[in-house]
Image (cartoon, rainbow, N blue to C red):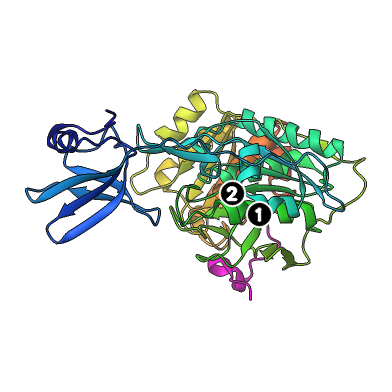
Amino acid sequence: MSLQGYRGRVLEILEAAGVAVGDRIRVRKGSQVFEGVLMPRSELGDDRHIVLKLDDGYNIGIAISEDLSVEKLGAFVEIKPQLPPIPIKKGEGLPHVAIVSTGGTIASRVDYRTGAVSPALTAQDLYSVVPELSNIAYIEAEVLYSIFSENMKPEYWAGMAKRAAKYIEEGVDGIVVTHGTDTLGYSSAALSFALRNLPCPVVFVGSQRSSDRPSSDAAMNLVSAVTFAGKSPIAEVVIVMHGESGDTYCYAHRGTKVRKCHTSRRDAFRSINAQPLARVKEGVVEVLTSNYSPRRESRDDFYVDAKFDEKVILIKSFPGMTGEFIDHAVDKGYHGIVLEGTGLGHVPVYVFDSIKRAVEEGLAVVMTSQCLWGRINMNVYSTGRELLAMGVIPGEDMLPETALVKLMWVLAKTQDLKEVKRLILTNIAGEISPRTCYSYYFGGEVE
């Protein structure tokens, strides 16, 4: 009998009832009656609860008590899902879209041994379980990585860029990259710099909730991403995710101007100091701005520039901060520092000596702000002016994570500080807004 994860008193109750994980059971507790499938427990869970999957798809935990009873209603029957075959014949008039899977919740299932969500689905599985895709595009799918996004590295950014380039050179109409949401903004920024003169869209997509949950956003996000990749007139690196908490539409955010702003909401992603590039609703891509790079037939000038200097660090300013963090970066041979300063771009005066030392020893130091909206202005207060005089480079209105990725990309080209400063202050992939619009504050909901 399999009762994975159960122990102690709750295990005794289930064994006495003759049930196993996967059986349909009825649990009575006082006047309450629950029916569902007995689920395995996490090995790290307590020994006082039974976990049931109800008919509506949600799991509940039932605390054991003296008046609790368990009755077996049906034995476990293993059902092996038969996924429909993946179409290999190109549909008449459909765009050709490549789906490259790197992992994340959108390509995950629940691991009940640990209670965690683990990468399990291949990109082809995604296509098979979302049949609507067959009416939107001819799909070519592959798995590049199967990792959690928190384990992403610059070398993986380079790998994604090179794989996207392969498909672009083969003539696809668009590329979708499935990715975990936690570091989605870093990867989208990296490919925004690495893929030069894009002729077609490269669309990052993820999901906040796994596909086994009734409230999953995976299918809608994927359908919207493929729609954008195949139909959009915009040829940029973007992130396509839910635009509001319901299932009405998705937004396409520029890859260098987007951040995950909520841990679990389906509409967690917001454009910062910019408006979304487009809205995807009911199979239609509605462009929301005239400021974008258009899709092009010619691919002659497209190229990949995917080298990143990993010796760059992001340091957040805080009260009581000391210069030892900056000194450590210098001593360890780092080539660049992005400071996430306060307000208009400030750090405590008692770290100035360390910053001055870093610049004098050849490190590029870029200032950004902990504030989400607005831009750096280091000329307002004496603190900022002193930092500018030391050689600190103002990061304009770049997000700290975008500035980090950009500095990695720039330092892979040159470590001449004058040239580094010139490139950092050059708007290369829409990362710097020419001016900060009031209507963009808190995402500037587009009507």
Q: In terms of secondary structure, where does tag 1 sit?
A: helix
Which secondary structure dominates the residues rendered in magenta? Answer: loop
Q: Residue 255: x percent and y percent? A: 66, 50
Quadrant where the N terminus is found in the figure: top left
- Residue at the disc numbered 2: 388
Q: Is residue 390 visible in this depiction of the protein?
A: no
The range drawn in magenta is: 432-447
**Residue 4: which quarter of the image?**
top left
Labels 2, 1: front one: 1
Residue 171 placement, left or right of 154: right
Identify the residue position indicated by label 1 in the image.
223
Tell me which numbered mark, 2 or 1, is placed earlier along the sequence.
Answer: 1
Considering depth in this image, is 167 or 253 the residue closer to the camera? 167
Q: What is the crowding at mark 2: few (fewer than 14 residues within 10 Å), some, or many (at least 20)?
A: some
- Residue placed most toward the observer, 400 or 326: 400
- Residue 377 rendering spot, x and y as whole percentages: 58, 59
Type of amino acid under label 2 = Leu
Above or below for 353 versus 27: above
**What percent of the width, then of the height, locates residue 330?**
51, 28
Secondary structure category for the residue under label 2? helix
Residue found at x 86% / y 36%? 170
